[in-house]
Amino acid sequence: MTQSARRLLAALLAALTLAAGAAFAQTELRMTWYDDGSESEVMSELVERFEAENPDIDVVIDVVPYSSGILESLPLQLASGQGPDIARVTDLGGLQEYFLDLRPYLDDPAYWDANFGPFHDWMRADGSDAIPGFMTQLTVTGPYVNATLFEQAGVEMPGEGATWEDWAEATNEVAEATGVFAMAMDRTGHRLAGPAISMGAQYFDENGDPIVTDDGFRRMAELMVDWHADGTMIPDVWIGSQGSYVAGNEQFVNGQVALYMSGSWQIGQFTELIGDAFDWKAVPNPCGPDGTCTGMPGGAALVGIADTDHPEEVARLMDFLAQEEQLGEFYGRTLFIPGHLGLAESGVDFDADLPATQEALSQFAAEVPKLADAAYALQGYQYNRVVFDATRDRLTQVFVGELTLDEAIDRMQRDIEEQIAEAQ
Amino acid sequence: MNRSAAPAPRPRRYTPGRAAFGVFAVVMTVIGWVIEPIQRLIGVRRMPWVFLLPNLAIFGVFILFPMVMNFYYAFTGGTALYPLERPFVGTQNFEQIYACGNYLNPATCNEDLFWRAVWNSFTFVAFHVAGLVFFALITALVLNARIVARGFFRSVYFYPVLLSPVVVGLIWKWILQRDGVLNGILVSLGFDRTLFLLNADWSMFWIIVVTIWANMGFHTLILLAGLQSIPKELYDAGSIDGTGPLQSFWHITLPLLMPNVVVVLVLAMIRAVQMFDLVYVLTGGGPGSATLLMVQYIYEVGFASQIQRFGLAASASVTLGVVLLIITLIQLRLTRGSESHLA
């Protein structure tokens, strides 16, 4: 073999090696995820199935804490262009500028429009027809009660149409008889918003600007102040912190409160952690003086990120996960209210043997038609977290005596206006 | 003629020491290839700059550049992350922070939470530093004495320093929370449950106690080193003159230990002004804003809110930087003072 023939052979071998390497090179997609319960396990299984069908794509799921990972770090990663390819988010309006429009990459965008259309408005700019992602869950806020404590105390549970004051009275009786706290509420302005709207809060003025200065909001704020002052509310959740979200689920799971204001996403966790250790149930949202009895809608969405280097692969994965077969299994196993209109209509086969779980799912589903327009408007508002955070932190200052309620409402409004002005 | 044969050369033996020397020689030769042309080019007198260059580069990239960027951000507004996308707003962020009816009453200030954080930090720093120096000194004196199991106790007091502040915060939260270990003990002894972390005064008290506990070991070590360097003859001489233990402490120990005390004082003060992690885990800055310190305020304004106000956070950081600079200058002054006094 001549020297030139050897060189040619070597070059061919090198080219073949490179080509083979390229043929088997995998595209890595990173998905940032958080757990309410253990839904990352279900998502991992679905992703494994996708990878088996698409060997050219490797999906890495990074499970992060909700507060520090999703609410605090992810926005910075996205702003710096260092975010993941896909993320599970709850700040649908606030982060919308970073979402990838999947429409150009989807084989059947009509399927997405038909099944997720109404929710896309929460995660895209007004007038846009972008398809940023799909809802991994729809949520409705509402209270859970520890029925065993009511039974032990011999107190009758208020029924449909009962007001927040009725529930406070009943749970205080339970608390007195059993030595627990009457109520807990997750430390967030989102959880407060449903009861406040029931009390008449509008959250927006006639120009569409956010306000917390109306009588309805004040009524709910006064109740919260009173409930913390007289020991109706467990102090650990709202008073025990500053500047961050705190859930009251631990206190409810441990039987320390008679009523816990949270939402539908807790069903899976309660099924797992409480099971039948005591009787727990979801009850209708209590009402305000004019008969409005609303919670807040909400939810989490899985969205593609616009800065991804692999939009086609992201769309392929998203399209796989969004199909009825996968999503039906996901909702069924995680016990989440479906954010897929087709599945919501046909029904999801929930993986729940416990009667309490089935009843809670039915109860939260029954809350959906009762959600007030103001609740939908607030949920769809781009800067709703500014409103939620301001109400949460300033109200806490009232509970501990740092501000009067008048000062706090004045500060809330100022915080909201200043921050939104900064963003614009 | 019988000529004796020349001794055969001894076979070379390759020991690890020779091998290491060989590697060293090769490395130094390669370095020489780089350094010598530079030296010829810039001259011997300028060579120190070449050797300082790696450290200067690290200092520049990781300290100087962020400081300059922070200063720049303090004069810009908006929510954009990239500097060139941020509009220049002059001193607006500083005006926002310093607009105040009465600095002693945060409620009259535009940015009330900043001033609450400032006053909380003052309270925290004053009590934390005083307590830390006091207890570290007592502990160092005890550990310097001839006590049983001295080595064991020296390790015990240093052990918390090795723990992550987050772990320390979580452990103490477990102890102090409403249904925590301490309340469990108190209730079992017939006392009322106390809201250690849910009451403004108690929570400030406990963050001071816990941060002293967590940091005392390190400062004790510095003071112990100082105590051990005091010549024993001085105490012997004092003893001959009839000096009691208290007089020895005031007239021998404390003056000679003063340089170490100053170091401890300043290090503790700087660490206290920068305090964030442990307190954030233990109280989250609450209840309300009772234990909100300056660094947490900066973190929340800049990173934890939906609208991330980097400009406001940067201007608060500049303020904090100025405070730290003043403390450092005081340290330099005090250190020089104590050195000249000793001289």
Image (cartoon, coloured by chain):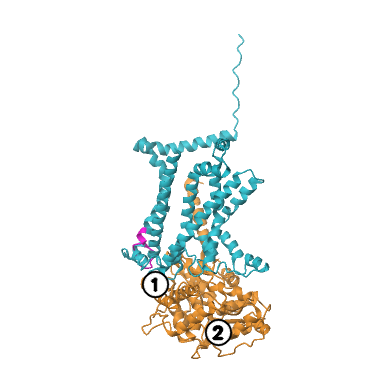
Chain colours: A orange, B cyan
Residue B72, image x, y percentages: 35, 59
Circle 1 marks a residue in which chain?
A
Residue A164, image x, y percentages: 54, 85
Which segment did they paint magenta? B71-82
Label 1 SS: helix
Work out how far the residue at label 2 is from the one at label 1, CA to CA, in angstroms.
37 Å
The main secondary structure of the magenta stretch is: loop
- Please tell me which residue is depicted at 36% across the width and 71% down the height of the picture: A422
Residue A143, image x, y percentages: 57, 82
Towards the viewer: B251 or A192: B251
Towards the viewer: A65 or A29: A65
- The residue at which mark 2 appears reads as A344
Q: Amino acid at mark 2?
A: Ala
Towards the viewer: B208 or B158: B208
Magenta span has B73?
A: yes
- The residue at which mark 1 appears reads as A419
What number is the disc on residue B2?
Answer: none
Magenta span has B314?
A: no
Q: Amino acid at mark 1?
A: Gln
- Please tell me which residue is depicted at 48% across the width and 48% down the height of the picture: A7
> In the image, is residue B279 above or below residue B56?
below
The answer to whether residue A49 is seen in the rendering is yes
Circle 2 marks a residue in which chain?
A
